[in-house]
Image (cartoon, rainbow, N blue to C red):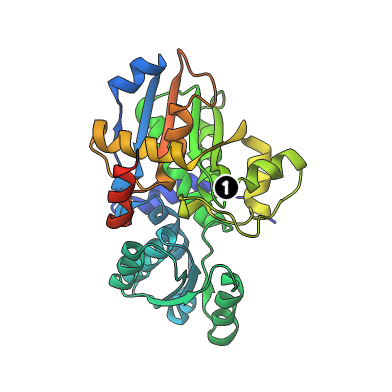
Amino acid sequence: MKLPNYEDVMRASHRLVNYAHHTPVLQSQTLNERLGAQVFFKCENFQRIGAFKFRGGYNALANLTEAQRQRGVVAFSSGNHAQAVALAAKLFQVPATIVMPRSAPAAKKAATLGYGATVVEYDRLTEDRERIAQRFVDEQGMTLIPPFAHADVIAGQGTAVKELIEEVGGLDALFVPLGGGGLLSGSLLAANALNPSCKVYGVEPEGGNDAQQSLAKGEIVRLDCPQAIADGALTPALAPMTFALIQQYAAGVVTVSDAELISALQFFASRMKLVVEPTGCLGAAAVMQERIPLKGMRVGVLISGGNVDLAQYGQLLATR
């Protein structure tokens, strides 16, 4: 297994010029004063398709051969990777099939279809999405673009932290949403190269803390049915590639509750006028709850996406 490195992140950055948005970095004076720290939010909710996933999806398709593009690609995702691969496939004029759970947010499903992809639905509780996707590889010769267990995907995701550090300078700590580990792995590569003293933490939902358990045990732990409102982080297990990078470079993994995610989501809406999906709030929730002491620090937070179903969003905003 060849792990990606920072040179791969730099190459991805060059490929993404003129295709991915250079997303803004925002601060909240209210939060800074409350924590006694400087917090820099990298707002990937303003990225194309509304999430960081476009970076990795585009980079992966950019590296396909012409023969692979002609046969098409297949991916599995609850939503943001689905949209990323669908849009990248549209830009490269490549056929795309996306395997999505029936319970995926309606907005994410509609956007994936809108980019021209074919959606194949499955039951998250009774069916194996990877097995379904593999059938398209075996029977139609499609290329699988997994959401995180892929060197080009990881390298693409790492460009977000590359941009963040180049824009704001050195950080003492960085908090990154963690599901399958693609974003965290790419972030670790960028931070280790550009800001090696920065401590990087993955943030999982309490109901899906497989990575936290994996680090504690020293081997990959699988959760059969993770449960949380952070639908983009309900991956049952890390991949060997992401686990290896997280083991090597991460300062640790912390968790947050659904209630803490809702509180962060409400803060973004009321104080910063930002629409952020629950998964995108993971890093922010950990900072707001001070899972790690932050006083006097310069802290980076990745807001990973803003693709929340409007009906669900209204309910979350009204939650007390």
Left or right: residue 35 versus residue 187 is left
- Which residue shows up at 54% across the image and 81% down it? 136
Left or right: residue 168 versus residue 222 is left
**Outermost residue toward the front?**
320
Q: Eyeballing the image, is 204 above or below 112?
A: above
Left or right: residue 96 versus residue 240 is left
Left or right: residue 142 versus residue 52 is right
**Outermost residue toward the bottom?**
139
Q: Eyeballing the image, is 71 above or below 316?
A: below
Crowding around mark 1 (Cα neighbors within 10 Å: few <14, some 14 to 19, many 20+) is some
Question: Amino acid under label 1?
Answer: Gly
- Can you see residue 20? no
- Which residue shows up at 41% across the image and 61% down it? 79
Residue 143 percent across, percent down from the top left? 53, 74
- Which residue shows up at 57% across the image and 52% down it? 180
Identify the residue under disc 1: 207
Quadrant of res 291: top right
Q: Secondary structure at mark 1?
A: helix
Quadrant of res 266: top left
The quarter of the image holding the N terminus is bottom right
- Can you see residue 103? yes
Residue 209 percent across, percent down from the top left? 61, 45
The quarter of the image holding the C terminus is top left
Residue 112 percent across, percent down from the top left? 34, 68
Give 15 or 37, whichever is nearer the viewer. Answer: 37
Q: Eyeballing the image, is 125 above or below 279?
A: below
Give 30 or 15, whichever is nearer the viewer. Answer: 30
- Which residue shows up at 35% across the image and 70% down it? 92
